[in-house]
Image (cartoon, helix red, strand yellow):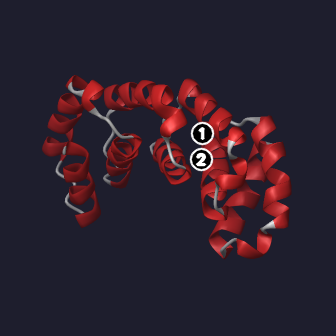
């Protein structure tokens, strides 16, 4: 599985540009064979972790993720959006589809996932006022469950989004 190979290379700190370039071409060719949403989130996370830019791959993955967004777990949505934000890569369709999905299952998200999503949206200026408004009550109610970094990221996201 190519997404697992990329994840391993990125996690180990081995950021071979040649490998990531070749893998991007291969993933794009075989995009329809990615069965699980985690293959998408792991792949884009790997490129973000390696700080390896691949606009064609990120465009293709945004389309694939948008089509499968209903099947993403909360962690996968958070990782995917964070990866796009880390690479400063805007995708209105992806962020729009993701925030719509988050709104449907907001109560299923852990504090760190909500924090990561809000931070990612604000970072790339893909802010959904409805999402930020809906998340406010949950953030306030569960503030004691947020880690300090998540509190900081959430406050930054709200300050940046407004």
Foreground residue among 104 and 140: 104
> What's the residue at 32%, 50% (across, down)?
46
In the rendered image, residue 61, in percent from the top left (x then y), is placed at 38, 31
Residue annotated with mark 1: 124
Q: Secondary structure at mark 1?
A: loop
Q: Is residue 96 above or below residue 106?
A: above
> What's the residue at 83%, 53% (across, down)?
136
Foreground residue among 91 and 123: 91
> What's the residue at 24%, 52% (across, down)?
4
In the rendered image, residue 44, in percent from the top left (x then y), is placed at 37, 43
Q: Crowding near pointer 1: few (<14 within 10 Å), some, many (20+)?
A: many
Look at discs 2 and 1 and give the one toward the viewer.
2
In the rendered image, residue 129, in percent from the top left (x then y), is placed at 80, 36
Q: Is residue 154 above or below residue 135?
A: below
Determine which quarter of the picture holds residue 26.
Answer: top left
Residue annotated with mark 2: 120
Judge whether residue 125 can be spotted in this image: no
Q: Crowding near pointer 2: few (<14 within 10 Å), some, many (20+)?
A: many
Horizontally, residue 29 falls left or right of residue 76, namely left
């Amino acid at each position: 599985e190519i997404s697992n190979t990329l994840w391993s290379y990125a996690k180990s700190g081995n950021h071979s540009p040649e490998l990531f370039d070749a893998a991007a071409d291969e993933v794009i060719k075989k995009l329809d064979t990615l069965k699980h949403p985690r293959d998408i989130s792991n792949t884009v996370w790997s490129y973000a972790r390696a700080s390896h830019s691949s606009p064609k791959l990120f465009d293709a993955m945004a389309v694939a993720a948008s089509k499968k967004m209903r099947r993403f777990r909360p962690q996968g949505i958070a990782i995917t959006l964070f990866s796009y934000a880390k690479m400063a890569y805007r995708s209105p369709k992806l962020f729009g589809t993701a925030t719509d999905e988050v709104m449907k299952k907001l109560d299923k998200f852990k504090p760190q996932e909500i924090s990561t999503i809000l931070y990612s949206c604000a970072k790339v200026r893909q802010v959904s006022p409805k999402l930020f408004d809906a998340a406010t009550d949950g953030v306030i109610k569960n503030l004691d469950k947020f880690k300090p970094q998540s509190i900081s990221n959430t406050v930054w996201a709200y300050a940046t989004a407004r």
